[in-house]
Image (tube, helix red, strand yellow):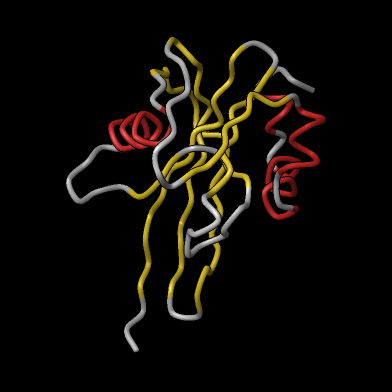
Amino acid sequence: MEWEIRTALKGIVRRGERILVLRRSDSDEIGPGTWEFPGGKIRFGEELEEALLREIEEESGLAVESGELLYATTFHPAPHRQIVLLSYACYWTGGEVALSEEHQEARWATREELGELLPTSILADLERWDVWDRLGLA
């Protein structure tokens, strides 16, 4: 078995006091039906910001402006696979949500709603890295 390490980027997209979350398609192989921030894998040769903006546009149809790196973490979706995840502050600049086939639902959620939607592992990272304070949503 070959080991695989991938780098992925997520955008914590803010519009006013709300954050965009997407619900993965029920047929998705990784985390079907779970809520997450938009983003995805970096392609060979891409700059971080380029990959982040491309993935957010592909998954949500939205134009955003990228901000600071909020936190980095790693997880293992399979025994032979490790994902290094970089999560950035992003700010909505225009457009309406148009989902890709990877997702089945989008929601502009308040901090309180995110506490009910997101997996506990993501919520723990948000608290650990003081993301709410850094986004001005404490």
- Counting from the top left corner in percent of width and height, residue 48 is at 32, 38
Is 91 situated left or right of 56 in this image? right
- Is residue 119 depicted above or below 108 in this figure? below
- Counting from the top left corner in percent of width and height, residue 66 is at 43, 23
Count of number-bearing discs: 0
Residue at x 25% of width, y 37% of height: 47
The quarter in which the N terminus is drawn is bottom left
- Counting from the top left corner in percent of width and height, residue 25 is at 52, 51
Furthest toward the bottom, the residue is 1
- Counting from the top left corner in percent of width and height, residue 24 is at 54, 48
The residue lying toward the viewer, choosing from 43 and 95, is 95
Residue at x 57% of width, y 32% of height: 106
The quarter in which the C terminus is drawn is top right
Residue at x 70% of width, y 55% of height: 121
Which quarter of the figure has residue 39?
A: top left
Residue at x 57% of width, y 37% of height: 105
Is 109 situated left or right of 46 in this image? right
- Is residue 2 depicted above or below 24 in this figure? below
The residue lying toward the viewer, choosing from 54 and 74, is 54
